[in-house]
Image (spheres, rainbow, N blue to C red):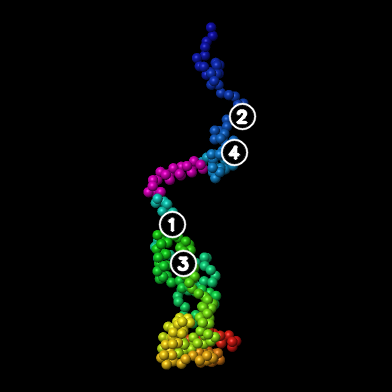
Amino acid sequence: MSEENPNPNSQDGGNGGGQQPNNGGNAPATPPVAALFEKGRPDWMPEKYWVDGKPEEAVQKLAGAYTALRGQFGKGKDAYKAEYEAERLKGRPAKPEDYKFAAPKEGLPADIVLLDKQPGADFKPDADKRYVVLDEKNPMLSFWRQTAHASGMDQATFDKGVAMFINNLAGDVPTQADLKAAREAEYAKLGEQGQARAQHVFRQATAVLGEEKARALDGVVESAEGIEAIELLLEKAGGARFAPGDVAAASGGQSLEDLKAMQRDPKYKSDPAFFRKVTDGFTRLERLGLLKAKH
């Protein structure tokens, strides 16, 4: 009677399904992770994590993203809100006053020129340019500073808003060419010698009021209705009526040759009042069309 093997898993007995297969002692069994990627990237693996030939690295990236996502949700609402606010405000200056006003590098039409203060009497504007004074004390700019800071804007975004403000402001600013065309249209309403008539009114007003106060009428004497109204008042006050053809009187009694001689006078460079008188003379001749005629 033979002895029975008490161990059913023994190689001498039945294998009971537990005998290890013989792989010939060559390559080890395929790792479980690698087996998932034998045919390349599976559909459930996002492309941004996939690395050809390195499935383990792709799994690590995916696991890391999942861990980070769980961390975000695990922080709670307040912590997430604080992190969002920090990101939103990271480019904002500490105070509204810390935003710098400067000429925007982009966003402005080529015909707009920014000035940091009101131009003086000797300012010579280009005919086709629009001049805008960027005054930091402007209430709208102060409002924009406050609004930008409350919205968390950085300096670059703030500058874009300033450019939009300047564009809107410049839309109401005429060029010198625009002003000249508007003046000529008004003078045409006064007749063939409308320019000379307007200058006659200004000369008469200067004689009565003085040059400084007469300058306050500059805007008035450039509209046909204003010129006629002042002309009537001056005539009732005993002023001389405009005589058609009296162009020399309307120009202030100074010819182009007179003005050029005054430019050679030493006072032209040392006396502001004298300088202003000469420049005003040239302006009058130009408005009358006499300056171009002499060239």
Distance from disc 3 to disc 4, alpha carbons, whole Å, reads: 56 Å
Residue drawn at point x = 48 percent, y = 65 percent: 164
The x, y position of residue 144, in whole percent, is 42, 64
Amino acid type at mark 3? Phe
Q: What main secondary structure does the magenta stretch of the protein show?
A: helix
Element at label 3:
helix
Residue drawn at point x = 42 percent, y = 92 percent: 238
Quadrant of the rendered structure where residue 96 is? Answer: bottom left
Label located before the other in sequence (3 or 2): 2
Check whether the beta carbons of the residues at disc 3 and disc 1 lie within 8 A of each other: no
Residue 165 - label: 3
The residue wearing badge 4 is 40
Residue 250 against residue 115 in the figure, above or below: below
The residue wearing badge 1 is 90
Check whether the beta carbons of the residues at disc 3 and disc 4 lie within 8 A of each other: no
Label located before the other in sequence (3 or 4): 4
Distance from disc 4 to disc 2, alpha carbons, whole Å, reads: 25 Å
